[in-house]
Amino acid sequence: MELKDKVALVTGPAKGMGADVTRALAREGADLVLVGRDTAAIEPVAAEVRALGQRALVARCDVTDPAAVEAAVKAGLDAFGRIDILVNIAGGTGPVEKRGWETSPEEFEEIIDLNLKGCFLTMRAVLPGMMSRRYGKICNVGGTFGMRAAPGRMAYSASKWGLRGMTKTFALEAGPHNINVNCVAPGMVEGPRFFDKVLPARAKRFNLSIAEARRHYEENYALRRISTGEDVANAVVFLVSDRSRQITGVDLPVDGGWASL
């Protein structure tokens, strides 16, 4: 129970790796404020949290809307009295297998708002309370395309490179208040987004079968396998626990060995 008696706010808690992270936090003893636009999708995950003996509050929120973010954080504070942990998972892929000059201004703006502005707004909302208590853990979920460039993912890469800079700046600014701010950077992760969007786009671009497209990714990784949501959840739990008390401002790749090798 690494997180016993802690309260964690999680954005994007219901789908893909978000559900794995939510369950992992609950298993470690955290109570949860679960934030997202699709509350119907969040409710079953909240039920799992409660079945594990932890409290769960579901709050409807568009993380790109400043007023909605402030309201969701207030709901968490009203329900639990404090927020000790923030995990930013809500995000999108943006255009896939589209070159920069093929990307529309609308597509670019949409993914920057979701992946970058959304994290800014949630950090901005929770930090005053963390600073007043002199305790806090923030973990942003970035991506390895924010550590190493890849063709066909310009807009997504821009959002995740920006998130790295934001994470490091907040780490410097919040550090004197005993607040850790870190970033987990998954590579490809098993889940609906990978199967329904990423693999078909790669298969179409290179005239591959879906199985061949998967191998195309796997062969780029030292461990020759695609990450799972549980792999990402394990890294998040470490970075929001006190085992990582002396770690801040880092980018932790969870990618089987691609971005850092």
Image: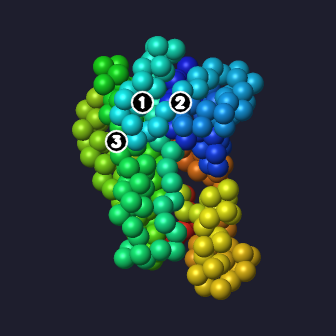
Q: Amino acid at mark 1?
A: Ala
Judging from the image, the colouring scheme is: rainbow
Residue at numbered disc 3:
120
Q: Amino acid at mark 3?
A: Phe
Which numbered marker is on residue 209? none
Q: Which residue is mark 2?
A: 60
Name the image quarter holding residue 159.
Answer: bottom left
Residue at position x 72%, y 27% from top? Answer: 47
Between 135 and 79, the one lying in front of the other is: 79
| SS for callout 1 | helix
Element assignment for label 3:
helix
Labelled disc at residue 68: 1
Please report whichever mark, 3 or 1, sits nearer to the chain's N-terminal start.
1
Image spot of residue 62 (x, y percent): 47, 37
Give coordinates of residue 59: x percent, y percent: 54, 27
Asked if disc 3 and disc 1 are in contact, CB closer than 8 Å, the reply is no
Give the left or right position of residue 42, taking residue 163 as reference: right
Say which of marks 3 and 1 sits in front. Answer: 1
Judging depth in this view, the residue of 5 and 106 nearest the camera is 106
Q: Tell me the SS state at disc 2.
A: strand
Tell me whether the residue at label 2 lies in contact with that at label 1, contact meaning CB atoms closer than 8 angstroms: yes
For the point 48% across and 21% down, the residue is 76
Residue 23 in picture, x, y percent from top left: 66, 36
Which of the two discs, 2 and 1, labels the residue nearer the N terminus?
A: 2
Residue type at tag 2 = Arg
Closer to us: 147 or 72: 72
Q: Is residue 10 above or below residue 251?
A: above
